[in-house]
Image (tube, helix red, strand yellow):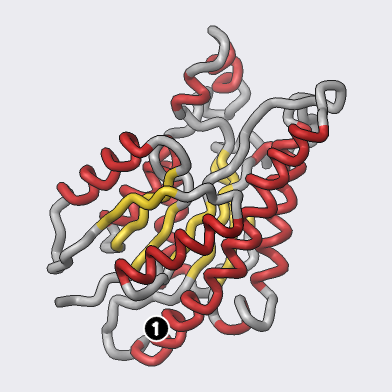
Amino acid sequence: MTLRRVAIVTGASRGIGRAIALRLAKDGFSVVVNYHTNAVKAQEVVDEITALPSKTECLVRAMAIQADAGNPADGKRLLDETIKAFGRLDIIVLHAGWAGECSIHDLTEDMYLTATTANIKGPIFLAKASQPYLLKAQEEADAVKDSGSPLGGSRIIITTTSATGMSNPGGGVLLYSVTKQALEQVARVLARDEQYGAKGITVNSVAPGPILTEGLRSLPPGYVEVLADQHPQKRNGEVDEVANVVSFLASGESSWVNGQNIGVSGGWTV
């Protein structure tokens, strides 16, 4: 049986997370489809992955694991169940998060705690808890990198938002943009940390602009078109266009990309 690399994608039951999970599966990964509440949608993603053609024999190509990625205890359980099922972890995509609208005038302490827990606390502690497993996989990749092995090294990939790069952000993105900006800095710091980047575990962030997800399509009539008109190509992005970038970062070809925030916005922010 050919060894397959293993990836966790948090918040993978729909939208961008779903597209990332499917793309990594097509790239040959066994994928853990993490979800918080929507078990039905998560299982649909697992079923889609299982139905994909495969070049390698593998007993389990995907599984859904429920966990609140913002809760460190749940995050640890997510890792434990992944290792129990697959025996390794090569890639973790920290996608789950909070994307609500809030201005300084609407801000409450509860809203602040919700946003920072989902968008900062959870991802940081998952990155911390995953390090021993990622390091083991990285050491295995280093040991066989000249033998034609499919192992490509360990990666932490964090999804943020292009809203952090806006020179004129609207007031409603206060908590969202601030907490996602913090995650970009987490990627930069870990990229140079002696137990992450210095060991070959690369850490990068991906910053999508407006992407045609269920959430975007549910906005008031006309708003999607307004956003599209702000792009040079006069359209919004597709979920697969984000997944394509994550696919590259998860591959061996990205080995010298570390500590970078890659915008996937079609020029919405430059």
Q: Label 1 crowding class (10 Å Cα cut-off): few <14, some 14-19, many 20+?
A: many
Considering the numbered disc 1 on the image, is that residue within a helix, a strand or a loop?
Answer: helix
Q: Name the residue that disc number 1 marks.
A: 141
In the rendered view, tell whether residue 192 sits above or below residue 263: below
Residue 141 coordinates in the image, percent (x, y): 39, 83
Looking at this view, is 45 or 250 the one in front? Answer: 45
Q: Is residue 258 visible?
A: no
Please report the residue visible at 42 percent of the width from the left and 80 percent of the height from the top.
137
Residue 128 coordinates in the image, percent (x, y): 61, 69
Q: Residue furthest right?
A: 105
Residue 187 coordinates in the image, percent (x, y): 65, 62
Q: Quadrant of the N terminus?
A: bottom left
Looking at this view, is 253 or 184 the one in front? Answer: 184
Kind of residue indicated by mark 1: Ala
Left or right of 47 on screen, residue 229:
right
Q: Quadrant of the C terminus?
A: top right
Q: Quadrant of residue 81?
A: bottom left
Left or right of 126 on screen, residue 65:
left
